[in-house]
Amino acid sequence: MKNTLYLLLLVCAPCIANAQKDSIEKLKSDIQTLQSQNQQLSARAVKLEDRIPYYESALKLQQSPIVQTIDGFDVRLTKVYYQEKEQKLYTEGLVISKKEGIHDLYFDGTMLKCIYPDGKIYQTYTILNNGKSLSTIGPIAMDVPYAFQIIFEKADKTPKLAALQFRINYTPEKTLMAQRMDFMFKGITVE
């Protein structure tokens, strides 16, 4: 019986060794394949990561529900952010006239206010376009965006504004009598 077992062991040992060699070779091949796939996926991930800022910006513009239309004017807030170093709150947006025959347009400096959730009110007279003081724009072209930036100085940092209020006055060419539009945006997230 012992001799049979020894004989069986001698006959099966090479088969087991060959099976282990085949298994090891297959595992090495699988490792090389997986490493190659990993490198390809890493390269694709880097390409996709490079696109993320573009898609984030596009998504912010598409999801921007911060638009109001009053009397044929669309006002869209595009960005509200806080600069801690300067202690300033910046509000950026666009005004677009959807009607013809507008002589001029201007922001009423006495009505530029932001209200914090705790009830603090900040007021400013600083409104800019392209870094320069924005006073009267005229004549107004239909469907053309006019950018604005309202800056609240010595403001506190906050994650959200309870409200942003401002007034835009415009003068129709026919009557040359100023018309006012009061805008109030509520619950604005601050970046």
Image: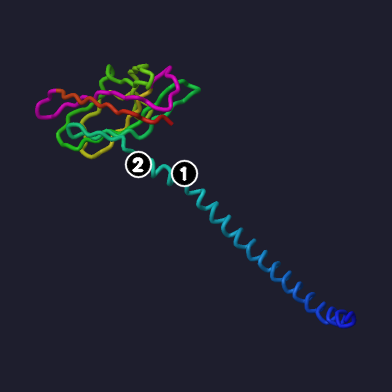
Q: Which residue is mark 1?
A: 53
Queried whether the magenta region covers residue 160, the answer comes back as: yes
The answer to which of 134 and 168 lies nearer the viewer is 168
Queried whether the magenta region covers residue 92, the answer comes back as: no
- Residue drawn at x 32%, y 29% as measured from the top left: 148
> Which x, y percent locates residue 100?
15, 36
Give the side of residue 5 with respect to residue 70, left or right: right
Q: Which residues are magenta?
A: 152-177
Residue type at mark 1?
Pro
Classify mark 1: residues with Cα within 10 Å, few (<14), some (14-19) or many (20+). Answer: few
The answer to which of 9 and 25 lies nearer the viewer is 9
Circle nearer the N terminus (1, 2): 1
59 up-or-down from 157: above or below: below
> Which x, y percent locates residue 102?
17, 31
Q: Which residue is mark 2?
A: 63
Residue type at mark 2?
Gln
- Residue drawn at x 86%, y 83% as measured from the top left: 4
> Which x, y percent locates residue 109?
28, 19
Q: Quadrant of residue 131?
A: top left
Q: Quadrant of residue 20?
A: bottom right
Q: Quadrant of the C terminus?
A: top left
Give the side of residue 31 with respect to residue 53, left or right: right
Asked if marks 1 and 2 touch (Cβ < 8 Å), the reply is: no
Q: Quadrant of residue 58?
A: top left
